[in-house]
Amino acid sequence: MSNINFNSLKTGPDSNGKFGIYGGRFVAETLMPLILEVESSYEKAVKDKFFIDELEKYRRDYIGRPSPLYLAERLTEHFGGAKIYLKRDELNHTGAHKINNVLGQILLAKKMGKNKIIAETGAGQHGVATATACALFGFECEVFMGAMDIERQKPNVQRMQLLGAKIYPVTSGTGTLKDAMNDALRYWVSNANTHFYIIGTAAGPHPYPKMVRDFQSVIGEEARSQILEKENRLPDALVACIGGGSNALGLFHPFLDDKEVEIFGVEAAGKGINSNLHAASLTAGSPGILHGNRTYLLQNEDGQITDAHSISAGLDYPGIGPEHSWLYDIGRIKYLSTTDEESLAAFELCSRLEGIIPALEPAHALHITGKLAAERKGQIIIMNMCGRGDKDLSSVLPLINKIS
Amino acid sequence: MNRIKKTFDDLKKSNKKGLGIFLTAGDPDFDTSLKIIENLPDNGVDFIEIGMPFSDPMADGPSIQLSSQRALKSGMSLKKSLLLVETFRKKNSHTPIILMGYFNPIYIFGKTKFINKCNEIGVDGLIVVDLPPEEDEELFIEAENKNLSCIRLVTPTTNKSRLEKILSNASGFVYYVSITGITGTQAPILENVSTNIKNIKSITDLPVVVGFGIRSPSQALAMANISDGVVIGSAVVDLINVSLDENANKSDTTINSCLNFITKVSKEIKHN
């Protein structure tokens, strides 16, 4: 039975975990009872005042929320058009939006009596957030990370180790996020009775896409009231980068029903959409089933998943959260893309003009933000600065030096 | 005539247990895998599970992951997996063939087209690992209506209310996953498997077959004694793996090492 209210775009998924045709529960039977338990526990938790108060306490006192909504005057001046506001989720404890979701899920795990945590990670931000929360709660933490990502995100690997997490390097496939998620799911199947899997993005089997979106929506809820306070009106546009798409949904979701707000998601175009070396699953993919949900995927004509490419480990994923796929089909959100090279330029620009070193992921969003701003004098744009770039320095600096 | 039903009825009449072998279509190449599969019935195999290779086999351990990769590298696709079955059927009309895999290649191929093709070439049943009963409308309802057996997986985590739900739409046989885990990685615990099979049998008359963790002839015998049959997969594809030459191509021993092992298992469980 569908419970989508067509007067609102915010009520999905339906009771089967579907957003239109996307989402669902495409998992092995071993995981099904567990996923149903996660779903019913989550539905109970969000109605439990104690759970909500505890989450609120950690958001405020541990993450440091609300994150500021910052008018980036020099970027605004540089592009010479719309006012650019940055939602500063890179100022969160652990340096990215990922912790918003992790604290929600770990409180749920605690409520379910599970104290062993599994996570996958690409850029390492979700792994660090999970390792952090596990340290805080005294839980065991096991992180699956692609061997190639371990190489390009060393500082995060060291942080996770210091925090007491066990890291499993994943060498299957291309050794990136997709493969890390495969191995995390396999490990979960093997430890279904004892472990809780904290998925880091708004993808995977129902209820994860919904749950992660809900925990991340704090970004958009804050941004909405902050902009109303500062400007006394809603923004004209929102921009965020998309790998799986959790930071983007977090910002976008509370604005979905505000028809006057245009929304832009930014995928990674890697070396160019026509190069076959990109991670733009909406722009260049087609619907299919992977990692427990139906969504847009990079795949060949035989339904084999193809490798994604992005300079940004956090965007290097051949799929996308199912709610994005639905919002793409119905046309509520426009999805654009930024190449590796364009993101490097934005990375450097933001560092120089604002004294904010962005992660490579939001640097993708910044490139598009700049382009949109230039054409929109008098308008207001909010971009999600979802992570900071310290982790990227060792891989980015040699490339920037080469370009300049 | 339903080959799966006839096979298990015949086994029951002769008081024997069934042996199923899983092989990935096209591992290590189309011709070699066809040759192995063609020889299975004469080596004591009662039914064959043919894996349709997928790039991201979420429920499989390293052995079958590698096997899938070898097959894809050799140029396999869903179409070629179907061609393999079609070729096998030309010479064998009695051995049940069950296609096993993940949903995405089927979804991309097209649900109805896939089901019709299966019927046309003599596929008897389907196991789609990532289609739990919650997603029955994706494939199984239409498949069942067109007389393809939809073989359900029951696992150690399946509780009683789910068991009833799963079995209400089951056909062919019930596949009991003997471990909480991925294929080929742990040894099942006899006592637990035995209890769970009794639970399944109290609800359904379908044969119950055990798989996912069986690697040796003696394990196969122990599991066969408490069920209607066993499936071995990872142990066989491991033999393919070790038999390959330095360029990862088949060698002179590839086919025989598989068949010798399978004969041993068959003899063990059939007391010949």
Image (tube, coloured by chain):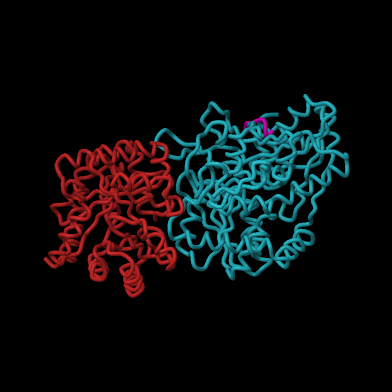
Q: Residue at x 50, y 37 (%)?
A: A287
Look at the picture and state if B171 lies above or below A308: below
Indicate left or right for A118 with B188 as reference: right
Q: Image check: B213 left or right of A1? A: left
Name which residue lies at 33% across and 75% down. B191
- Res A190 seen here: yes
Residue that sits furthest to the left in the current view: B272
The location of residue A15, given as percent across then percent down, is: 56, 52
Depth order, front residue of A217/A357? A217
Q: Is residue B229 left or right of residue A221?
A: left
Q: Can I make out residue A313 in this image?
A: no
Front-most of A135 and A182? A182
What percent of the width, then of the height, locates residue A63? 75, 57
Q: Colour of chain B?
A: red
Quarter residue A374 falls in? top right
Relative image position of residue B213 (x, y in whole percent): 33, 63
**Relative to the observer, which residue lies in front, A247 or A366?**
A247
Q: Residue extending furthest bottom? A: B191
* Residue closest to the eye, A74 or B113: B113
Q: Which residues are magenta?
A: A338-344
Q: Position of residue A3 (x, y in %)?
A: 60, 49
Residue B168 on the magenta segment: no
Principal SS element in the magenta part?
A: helix
Q: How many marks?
A: 0
- Quadrant containing the C terminus of chain A is top right
Q: Residue at the spot x=32%, y=41% of the render?
A: B115
Chain identifier matching the cyan colour in the rendered picture: A
Above-or-below relation of A81 to B250: above
Q: Quadrant of residue B263?
A: bottom left
